[in-house]
Image (cartoon, grey):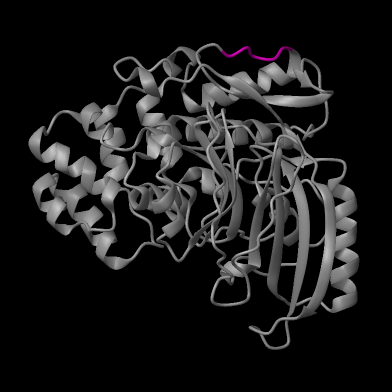
Amino acid sequence: MTGILHYTTTTKGIGGEIKRRITDFAVREITPGGKVLENKIFGDWWPPKQEPLEIPPQPEGKEQLILTMEKFNLDTHEALHRLSRMLRTSAKRIGYAGLKDRRAITSQRISIWNPEVERLKERGSLYVALREPEWSDERIEIGSLSGNEFETTIRNIQMPKDDLERTAQECFEQMQGGVANYFGEQRFGGNREITHRVGKEFIKGNFEGAVLLYLSGESEAEEEEIALARKSLRETGDFAKALKEFPVKFRYERAILNHLVKFPRDFVGAFQALPKHLRYLFTHAYQSYLFNLVINERVEQGIGVQKTNGDILENGVPTGPLFGFDSVIAEGRAGEIEKKVLEKEGTKLEEFRVKGFQELSCSGARKKIALVPQDLKLISIAPDEFNEGKLKMKISFRLGKGNYATTILREIMKAETHKA
């Protein structure tokens, strides 16, 4: 459904599962200067190793407090929401460089504009920790990172140890030639894998269809209560009834429904009830889906991630389009593939200028088609304490910003990697 179809490596998949435990997946941000942040607070130990937060005096002219935020089993936005609520300040005052996985232990740098220092020292969340404070005159913005380091444990592996080690090392070697740089499943809305489908409806100008799909699109992986509420809304179109049936924890859907109860035909206004950072995700997810389709077409035509006639290169590496109203299409064979994907989708570049909802418009960009993991290491192979008779394998690697760890893991596992 998300356009992720092919493998670049030819090794046998080791199978297994990831994120069996929260501590099985660690993400450490790499700063623009090349420093790799550490995980110090959360781990296999419990309780967390919280330490007093000693904030230095604020120098004149420096209004941004830079901190390392370490979080446990929370997505970045939820962690920042908890932090802003604790500080009794707007989340807009908090800057961050990129989103990190939810089911993981992650470390990243954030900035807070003129926080109330004493309140910040209280740090009222068990699953969000702050450390390494320093004052700056610059806010941390989206993209102000070099990349991320990942350390993950793959469990429930059935291979004999010698075969596992040999297969993993062979796969590691093949990946140094580059693998298909797919956007990972998390780009498409978790279990429902619906974000890009909603985005397409916005691109096509079908605002009603987009909002209703977001509210009522089902997934077999969802809990029964919310699945039934979505089904009921789809069948009845009754927003007031849906507002009573949608569980309280689905606050984004409920915010939209609240608006629709008052203004039943104002679908743009209803969608604007979502936080701004979420509204952008949908059309960007559709761009990502099309990018994955371009990779598929290249693989199916026997090109894959290698150069072909007409490619637009970045540092010698072929790029694919993140389609937008200002996109430059490649020439030659590469361009034919890009045009074919658009034609099969029935989408035109000018539609990415979303009339009537301009903030969802996409101007377009390009992204490398090949991904090469850096510092790819096999750390250990050992018996899996949660699966008798099976093995676990711990590995680590680094990726540049905007790339997905699951892209590397699926090449090794040749299996489903998604877990919410």
The residue at 10%/40% (across/down) is 261
Quick check: 87 above or below 324? below
Most common secondary structure along the magenta stretch: loop
The residue at 15%/43% (across/down) is 258
> Where does the image place residue 237, in percent across and percent down from the top left?
14, 44
State whether residue 238 appears in this view: no
Nearest to the observer: residue 345 or residue 77 = 77
The residue at 28%/28% (across/down) is 207
User: Where is residue 124, by image quadrant?
Assistant: bottom left
Look at the image and say whether residue 330 sits in the magenta stretch. yes
- Determine whether, in the image, residue 369 is placed left or right of residue 215: right
The residue at 83%/53% (across/down) is 376
Please state the extent of the stretch shown in magenta in the rendering: 327-331
> Where does the image place residue 400, in percent across and percent down from the top left?
72, 39
Look at the image and say whether residue 312 sits in the magenta stretch. no
State whether residue 268 appears in this view: yes
Q: Residue furthest bottom?
A: 388
